[in-house]
Amino acid sequence: MSASSPLLPSCLSHFHCHFLSHFRSHSAGEDGPTHQPIEAATLCRATPNLVLIRPGDGNECSGAYIVAVKRRDGPTVITTTRQNVPHLAGSKAEMVAKGAYVLQDCKEKPDLILIGTGGELHLAVEAAKLLNKFKVRVVSMPSWELFDLQPVEYRREVLLEGVAAVSIEAASVTGWERYSHYCVGMVGFGASGQLKDVFKYFGYTGPQIAETVQRWYDTYNGRLKELGTKSFPLLACHFTRVDK
């Protein structure tokens, strides 16, 4: 990551700095795998005193800037997508400070939660519409670090205990196991090609994500039935960290 030279001293010194970057991953297909750092978001999230925010639309982008200006105990990285994304119903600038919130919900208790972040948030919304066999809640999670700062009661309210949670991010899956039971993410390098072709190749379209989630849910749920339980396991985010 080219910004790592000023970023690390800022984190060490708790400087009030703002870093702006584009989220590249495999979405920069025309640039080839050498310019598709699928690990960059994971690197930022693993850096102490740093907050990474991936806004999913214009409202969340405004909220990200508000958080960055108000935050005084370390640098903030705002990573925006290079692609056009729609404004999403339910998105709220003020909720970015929570790290995650319910973007769209079903009338009854959901049996599936889709977690989207950044430019993949609208794909979570699209996939949710196609998963008509489920009662689906869509959660926007622009920032892990801000979500971890929330009371455990709030985290359990957003990501319900015992409910299947699937995260969607066009980047490394490392770390998502704290918030989801499965991650539609990258496990290898990107590829060269046009944006739409690369996205389709890696399965990042609404229909492909819906199909992947359906297949995973059927397999996982079948195993749970074999074990004699209906509830999905608790996640690490459902508990208070003991190392704080």
Image (tube, rainbow, N blue to C red):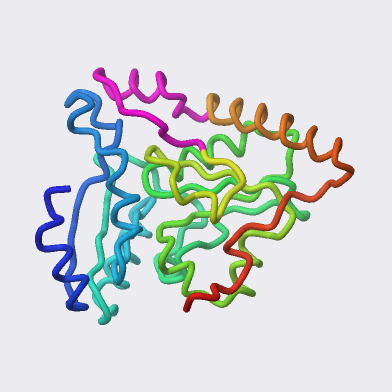
Residue 51, quarter of picture: bottom left
Residue 8, quarter of picture: bottom left
Work out whether 163 lies above or below 155.
Answer: above
Work out whether 32 lies above or below 65.
Answer: above
Magenta range is 184-206
Q: In the picture provided, is 120 more to the left or to the right than 109?
A: left
Who's the residue at 58% across and 49% down the image? 180
Who's the residue at 28% across and 79% down the image? 70
Who's the residue at 71% across and 60% down the image? 161
Q: Nearer the viewer, residue 200 or 57?
A: 200
Work out whether 158 lies above or below 24.
Answer: below
Magenta stretch: includes residue 200: yes
| Residue 96 horizontal/vertical position (percent) | 41, 66
Q: In the picture provided, is 135 more to the left or to the right than 127?
A: right
Who's the residue at 58% across and 46% down the image? 114
| Residue 210 horizontal/vertical position (percent) | 59, 30
| Residue 112 horizontal/vertical position (percent) | 69, 45
